[in-house]
Amino acid sequence: MAATSKDGPELHRATVELAQGRNYGAITTILPSGNLQTHPIWVHSDGERLVVNTETHRRKYKNVERDPNVTLTIRNEENPYHYAEVRGEVVEKVTGQEARDHIDELSQKYHGEDYPPDNIISERVMLWIVPSRQTIVDQTASSID
């Protein structure tokens, strides 16, 4: 089993590759009670930051409004023993047409079609995440670069 950890805001190459592929994430946020909440989520990266997309009425958005600390785990869908765990914080929130266009891009990536407009209840919002710590695990490899 190979694993490596990295502190700081620079994304590990393996994290970027996982986020840019058709791999699903799971985002963990902190509820008002202090308990944790985890949701599956689509994820992407611009090479410097990670980005997810949600709606402003959803609990995960309300949670990051109150406390921007999150953990985002991205699993390699072709090899579930290979994943990245990213602890960090939401440093930017983007709404409006850019966020609406972004959910279409994510839907194209994962499903090959635009996101159904009827599924949008409130306003789309992009959550940009900068890591403070990353752990890359590949239980099928002897080392991780």
Image (tube, grey):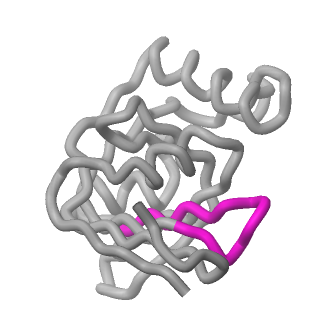
Nearer to the camera, 141 or 29: 141
Q: Quadrant of the N terminus?
A: bottom right
Task: Tell which of 94 and 4 is nearer to you.
Answer: 4
Q: Is residue 25 left or right of residue 96?
A: right
Whether residue 89 is situated above or below residue 134 in the rendered picture: above
| Residue numbers of the magenta segment | 71-83
Q: Residue at x 57, y 75 (%)?
A: 138
Quadrant containing the C terminus in the rendered view: bottom left
7 to the left or right of 134: left
The quarter of the picture where residue 49 lies is top left
Residue 100 on the magenta span: no
Q: Reply above or below: 129 against 135.
A: above
Seen at 48% across and 66% down, the residue is 84
Across and down, in percent, residue 43 comes to 55, 45
Q: Quadrant of residue 139?
A: bottom right
Relative to 116, residue 7 above or below: below
- Residue furthest to the front: 142
The percent coordinates of residue 22 (x first, y second) are 70, 44
Report whether 109 appears left or right of 60: right
Looking at the picture, tell me which residue is in the foreground, 120 or 100.
100
- The quadrant holding residue 35 is bottom left
Specify the farthest residue to the top: 97
The x, y position of residue 127, in whole percent, is: 38, 41
Q: Is residue 79 magenta?
A: yes
| Residue 54 visible here | no
Q: In this orientation, does residue 83 appear?
A: yes
